Image: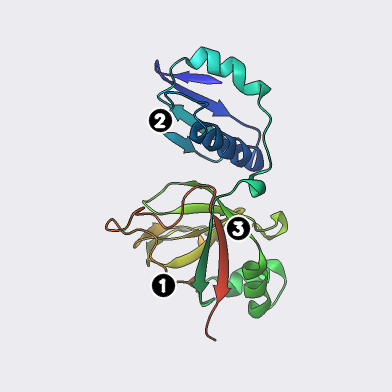
Amino acid sequence: MLPVGSRALLVELGGGEETAAFHAEVLRRRAAGLLPGVGEVVPAARTVLLDGVDAPSALAREIPRWEYAHPGDTAAGEVVVPVRYDGPDLPEVADLWGVSEQEAARIHASAAYRVAFCGFAPGFGYLTGLPDAYAVPRRPTPRTAVPAGALALAGGYTGIYPRPSPGGWQLIGTTTALLWDPSREPAALLSPGTRVRFVPEGP
């Protein structure tokens, strides 16, 4: 537990699953009125920042006594994302996995995903759910331009680029899903805790 300023607390956790479970429990307790004063809650890969904490020291002593469920039991909602597995790096990813391109697409689409945290760009979610055996490295040289809607892999994460930007992830597909729309409420299609299912479409 690390104090951040006078009214925030950064909680460091052991890994992605523990972080997801803790984040879900924070949201549950805040919704139940059990965390007075806690405003913004920001999850990351191995931390959760609690901002607007009335008594950070007291909360830091209380948190280790919490018991909470697996994040799969508390995740909020599901988003279905149509995808064409037509990315330029799909052949390389399939080769890394030792399978055909069609099988690589099937493997990816068959996993159950969850948004662990968001960052990099508005609307970009870091999705977990692909088995560890299918983790892939980033590209040795990032691309200067990746199109919006590109479905990509890096390490154990899956992500979708919400807008054109540079990027070093392996591009395996594309989607027409709108990840970020300021005129929509909420603007982001994906938020931490959301379950995501990819549905292949087209040849």
How many residues crowd around disc 3 within 10 Å: few (fewer than 14), some, or many (20 or more)? many
| Residue to which mark 1 is pinned | 176
Residue 19 to residue 81: above or below: above
**Secondary element at image label 1:** loop
Q: Is residue 40 left or right of residue 198?
A: left
Name the outermost residue toward the bottom: 203
Mark yes or no: residue 14 visible. Answer: yes
Q: In which quarter of the image is residue 99?
A: bottom right
| Residue to which mark 2 is pinned | 39
Q: What residue type is labelled 1?
A: Thr
Question: Earlier along the polypeptide chain: callout 2 or callout 3?
Answer: 2
| Residue to which mark 3 is pinned | 113
| Position in image of residue 27 (x %, y %) | 52, 37
Whole-angstrom CA distance, mark 2 to mark 1, is 33 Å
Question: Earlier along the polypeptide chain: callout 3 or callout 1?
Answer: 3
The residue lying at 52 percent from left, 85 percent from top is: 202
How many residues crowd around disc 1 within 10 Å: few (fewer than 14), some, or many (20 or more)? few
Residue 27 to residue 147: above or below: above
| Position in image of residue 152 (x %, y %) | 51, 63
The residue lying at 46 percent from left, 55 percent from top is: 190
Q: Is residue 47 left or right of residue 42?
A: right
Question: Earlier along the polypeptide chain: callout 2 or callout 1?
Answer: 2
